[in-house]
Image (tube, grey):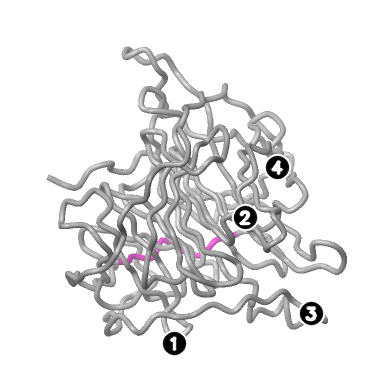
Amino acid sequence: MQGLELSLSVCVALTACGSTQRSELDPAGGTPSGADDDAADDTKSTGNDSGSGTGERQDSVGDGTEDHGEDPSEDNGEDGSTLALDVGSTPDPDGGASCGCEDVDDGIYVLGEAGDLWFYDPPTNAFSIRGAHGCDAGLSAPFSMSVSRRGNAWMDFIGFIPGPGGVSGTLHRAPVSAPGDCADSGYMPAPGFGMVGMAFASAGELDNCDQLYMVTGDDGSGTGALARLDPGTLSTEIVGALDIGMAELSGTGDGRLFAFAAPSSGGIASLHQLDKETAAIIETVPLVGLSLTQAFAFGFWGGDFYFFTESSTGSSSRVTRLDYDGSDGGGLIPMSGLAPIRIVGAGVSTCASLTPEG
């Protein structure tokens, strides 16, 4: 996700663009070594520094409930082709439902501001390029991303338009294995849901079929909300009010949904676990020392969270790990080096590891 202050041609071409200034962190270290961007398996390794930080959990203020996967549905793309939605379930011996994983790697996919898709491998702290998106989004800019169990990256592109709201949004979809093969999903956003943070989350521990959730930022007027994508109409289905400021989402294969957010007026960022049925906050972890910055994203992998925030140079991102499961003593741990791109979106499929390797 990018802050409202975007140095993009779409903003320059208009008389005004929204702006939200955010504080920055100090540089986290050196830059990664060079890599051949044309090779999908060419990585940029940045190592791993141990560190300390905060991240103590606060008491819950709500209870989580599980929802259930929908039947597979289809929607027609702009070119008349059939686009199967990334939802659906099959009977599971344990009494729930099961959806398979297709062409998706165990890690975090990240989207650069130029629209290039990369893969981040948490155990090695390394980035590898997967290719540029082929989405016909006009002057719109990539803003957020999520990844489904079926190996599709869903990308939100935004543009600024005159009139109330001032933002238009389109949702495109491309295989993570072939990001150039992109199509408009036909997404019909509810008012205010053009510019969103988003993530797939499984229905629950016994039903790993995923649904796409979206959050729209609160501008201070109490207008923030959580929604999910209706699989039959590709429209947003409002779950409930959620006034936590600008936010991104990340989901897990056991049915949890989290938000990385901070007040629109600035302040300490927090990690919130959300109730997928009511939008109530179940748990909050203050992230003292970590700001959203103008470009931010995050993802859950292996029991922990990985936050991608803008570096002081403005042209790259730093990575900070929250030892959420406490396997390394807890707290925030800055990862060494910088990402090779300025990251505006991150997506983790619900196929990703729930616990550390080994």
- Going by the numbered disc 3, the residue's amino acid type is Ala
Q: Residue 16 has which mark?
A: 3
Magenta residue check for 176: no
- Going by the numbered disc 2, the residue's amino acid type is Val
Q: Earlier in the sequence, mark 1 or mark 3?
A: 3
- Residue at left 62%, top 27%? 73
- Going by the numbered disc 1, the residue's amino acid type is Thr
Residue that protrudes farthest toward the bottom in the picture: 313
In the image, residue 346 above or below residue 72: below
Mark 1 lies on residue: 313
**Horizontally, is 235 left or right of 47 in the view?**
right
Q: Residues within 10 Å of mark 2 (few under 14, many from 20)?
A: many
Work out how far the residue at label 3 is from the one at label 2, CA to CA, in angstroms: 20 Å
Give residue 307's quadrant in the image: bottom left
Q: Residues within 10 Å of mark 3 (few under 14, many from 20)?
A: few
Q: Are marks 3 and 2 in contact (CB under 8 Å)?
A: no
Q: Earlier in the sequence, mark 4 or mark 3?
A: 3
In the image, residue 280 above or below residue 109: above
Work out how far the residue at label 2 is from the one at label 1, CA to CA, in angstroms: 25 Å
- Going by the numbered disc 4, the residue's amino acid type is Gly
Label 2: element kind:
loop
Q: Earlier in the sequence, mark 2 or mark 4?
A: 4
Q: Earlier in the sequence, mark 4 or mark 1?
A: 4
Return the residue nearer the eye: 322 or 242.
Answer: 242
Chain part drawn in magenta: 127-134
Work out how far the residue at label 4 is from the one at label 1, CA to CA, in angstroms: 39 Å
Mark 4 lies on residue: 77
In the rendering, at what x and y percent does residue 120 appear? 33, 61
Q: Nearer the viewer, mark 4 or mark 1?
A: 1
Residue that protrudes farthest toward the left in the picture: 358
